[in-house]
Amino acid sequence: MMTHAPSHNDTLSPLGIVQAKIAKAAKTAGRKPEDIELIAISKLHPAEAALPLIAEGQRVFGENRVQEALEKWPALIKETPDIRLHCVGQLQSNKAKTAVELFDAIHSVDRPSLIEALARAMDTLDKRPECFIQVNIGEEEQKGGCDIADTKAILKQCRDAGIPIIGLMSVPPLEVEPAPYFALTVKMAHDLGLPAVSIGMSADYELAITLGATHIRVGTALFGHRA
Ligand SMILES: *Cc1c(COP(=O)(O)O)cnc(C)c1O
């Protein structure tokens, strides 16, 4: 009878599996795993779902709605003050102040009215979360993000308003090969002199890493399917 040692994945947690895949993709691309920030996207999962990840050492989490983040995270952050929270969803201007108060990074800066509201909130609170400009990389009608052609002007407007932009964020169209959209986002960030690129989700974060992602936003692979 043949016996064999259990594979790694038999004993690893979901976080351990994702970390191992990040390390492998980084190695393939000749990059260092520590240059890739894993943002655990906990949206639509209860606060308790984050506890095992926090216990395993994960400190960077993301939400896509301000109200939900406000209900879940202040208590968790009180327990574990070095948690850093990222806003990855479309942001309404009237939530800008709450968002600046709550989040350490905002990935969805995409239009003049929001830039004005964020700049006002940052001045009032004297707090400047690191921000990404979201680009509508597939030029989709209903999608958040600025037009590709407007990105440079949006960046200038952010800088003039004192909003610290560190990179670009994009979400490719559903159900098409994402590689060309990831590659274009990386090229645009490079051409604009921006160091950070927020691309890649559960289905494609390894690909995103090989193409240059510095921030990956992973929900389902860590928390399971959302209701
Ligand atoms: C929900 C969400 C994610 C995570 O998606 P998964 O496929 O569950 O990993 C990433 N980015 C954004 C903007 C999201 O809204």
Image: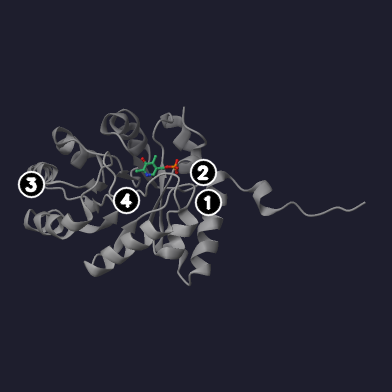
Viewer-nearest of labels 2 and 4?
4
Q: Residue at x 52, y 36 (%)?
A: 224
| Residue on which the image places disc 2 | 221
At x 27%, y 63%, the residue is 189
For disc 3, the marked residue is 123
The three-letter amino acid code for the residue at tag 1 is Val
Whether ligand 1 has any atom under 8 Å from the Cβ at mark 4 is answered as no
Residue 164 seen in render = no
Left or right: residue 25 compared with residue 79: right
Badge 2 amino acid: Ala
Label disc, if present, on residue 18 of the rendered structure: 1
Q: Nearer the viewer, mark 4 or mark 3?
A: 4
Looking at the picture, which amino acid does disc 4 mark? Gly
Say which residue label 4 marks.
138
Q: CA distance from mark 1 to mark 4?
A: 27 Å
In the image, residue 174 above or below residue 159 = above
The residue mark sitting in front, 1 or 3, is 1
Disc 2/disc 3 C-alpha distance (Å): 37 Å
Q: Position of residue 15 (x, y in %)?
A: 52, 47
Q: Are marks 1 and 2 in contact (CB under 8 Å)?
A: yes
- Mark 2 is surrounded, within 10 Å at the Cα level, by few (under 14), some (14 to 19) or many (20 or more) other residues, namely some
Three-letter amino acid code at the position of disc 3: Asp
| Image location (x, y in percent) of residue 208 | 43, 58
Q: Earlier in the sequence, mark 1 or mark 2?
A: 1
Answer with mark 2 or mark 4, whichever residue precedes in sequence. 4
Which quadrant of the figure has residue 70?
A: top left
Question: Which is closer to the viewer, label 1 or label 4?
Answer: 4
The Cα–Cα distance between marks 4 and 3, rounded to whole angstroms, is: 33 Å
Q: Are marks 2 and 3 in contact (CB under 8 Å)?
A: no
Separation (CA) of disc 2 from disc 4: 24 Å
